[in-house]
Amino acid sequence: EVFHAWQYWNEVTISNDTLGFDGFDGIDWDLEGNDDFSSQYNIFTIECLDLVGKFSQLAKKNGYVVTMAPCESYVDPTQNKFDRYVNHTYPEWDILVPGFYYHGHNTYTYLLSKYDESTN
């Protein structure tokens, strides 16, 4: 279990009483794609998204803070498009940042729809 390995690392391995550091209070997800436009890592697999969702629920259940601040195209209520790719372009951005290929189509909404139940 990934969460329990992280929890052990956080509470036992890096926690340092001498420094007054009890470990991290939680996690702030910032999932992004790869700088190489054609990389296979510019799509979030269902397995990856489920790992993030399950990890987040377990973290909250165990008293950790879990936050996520997606870039606007990863949760965009003005768009009805959805996929798991994060290498899209938005024409309106070409004027501001030509060649910016890092937009998504509501990629994080999978997490919010499947794992939205708070455990606390």
Image (cartoon, grey):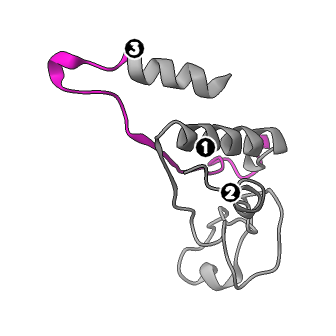
Badge nearest the viewer, 2 or 3 = 2
Q: Which residues are magenta?
A: 14-40
Q: Is residue 103 left or right of residue 110?
A: left
Residue type, mark 2 in image:
Glu
Local crowd at mark 2 within 10 Å, few (<14), some, or many (≥20)?
A: few
* Rendered image: mark on residue 117: 2
Q: Decide which of tag 2 and tag 3 comes sooner along the chain.
A: 3
Residue type, mark 3 in image:
Thr
Residue linked to disc 1? 56
* Rendered image: mark on residue 8: none
Q: Circle 1 — which element?
A: helix
Q: Is residue 22 above or below residue 52?
A: above
Q: Is residue 111 magenta?
A: no
Q: 33 or 64, which is in the foreground? A: 64
Q: Residue 73: x, y in percent? A: 65, 71
Magenta portion: prevailing SS class: loop
Q: 2 or 41, which is in the foreground? A: 2
Q: 84 or 7, which is in the foreground? A: 7
Q: Residue 102: x, y in percent? A: 65, 61
Residue linked to disc 3? 13
Q: Circle 2 — which element?
A: loop
Q: Quadrant of residue 75?
A: bottom right
Q: Quadrant of residue 14?
A: top left
- How far apart are the alpha carbons under marks 2 and 3? 30 Å
Local crowd at mark 3 within 10 Å, few (<14), some, or many (≥20)?
A: few
Q: Residue 106: x, y in percent? A: 73, 68
Q: Residue at x 59, y 72 (%)?
A: 72
Q: Quadrant of residue 71?
A: bottom right
Local crowd at mark 1 within 10 Å, few (<14), some, or many (≥20)?
A: many
Residue type, mark 1 in image:
Ser
